[in-house]
Image (tube, grey):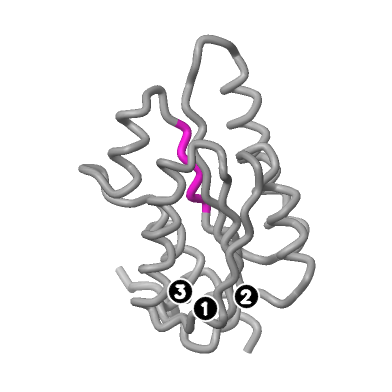
């Protein structure tokens, strides 16, 4: 059985790329750790600090509109969305988490600009903390790496 004739994928190389990082202020004790992880990952992949802009929004529900503005601005090769939605006693969680994810996906489809999804949707604060630099890693860093890889992939497709 013959292998694939050609495999295309992005590289984790952020040299020369520009990024917007949209981070919610709500649950800042979690989101700030995601942001630190994302910024550290971008630097490790070669992004210059001058090419990374952080945009703070009130909460996860506001993330999609800021992501859309950054994506349609065409100043950025990729956007990284960071937030933390933690389940409470009401269905508010379902609306915020679902609409945030849907809005971010719609921005990617409408603009073609990749968005690294680092919005935690957890049942408990402990789960969120584990995913923001704890035992489960740092999902902000993971989202940044995904954004770098997708930006590189899309650039390779364009050439």
Q: Give the side of residue 72 with respect to residue 78, left or right.
A: right
- Of residues 42 and 36, the one nearer the viewer is 36
Which badge, 2 or 1, is on the more N-terminal residue? 2
Q: Which mark is residue 79?
A: none
Q: Earlier in the sequence, mark 3 or mark 1?
A: 3
Where residue 49 appears, as percent x and y from the top left, is: 49, 79
User: Which residue was labeled with disc 1?
Assistant: 152
* Rendered residue at 59%/82% (across/down): 155
Main secondary structure found in the magenta portion = strand
Per the image, is 6 magenta? no
User: Residue shown at 57%/23% (left/top)?
Assistant: 93
Q: Nearer the viewer, mark 3 or mark 1?
A: 1
Determine which residue is flagged by label 3.
9
Image quadrant containing the N terminus: bottom left
Q: Residues within 10 Å of mark 1 (few under 14, many from 20)?
A: many
Q: Is residue 52 left or right of residue 4?
A: right
């Amino acid at each position: 059985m013959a292998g694939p004739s050609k495999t295309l994928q992005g590289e984790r190389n952020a040299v020369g790329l520009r990024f917007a990082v949209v981070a919610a202020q709500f649950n800042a004790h979690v989101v700030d750790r995601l942001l630190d992880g994302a910024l550290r990952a971008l630097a490790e992949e070669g992004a210059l600090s001058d090419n990374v802009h952080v945009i703070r929004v009130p909460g996860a529900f506001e993330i999609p509109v800021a992501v859309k503005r950054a994506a349609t601005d065409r100043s950025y090769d990729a956007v990284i969305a960071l937030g933390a939605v933690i389940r409470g006693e009401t269905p508010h969680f379902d609306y915020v988490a679902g609409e945030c994810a849907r809005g971010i996906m719609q921005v990617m489809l409408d603009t073609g600009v990749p968005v690294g999804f680092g919005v935690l949707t957890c049942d408990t604060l402990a789960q969120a903390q584990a995913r923001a630099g704890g035992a489960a890693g740092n999902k902000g860093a993971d989202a940044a790496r995904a954004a770098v890889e997708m930006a590189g992939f899309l650039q390779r497709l364009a050439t």
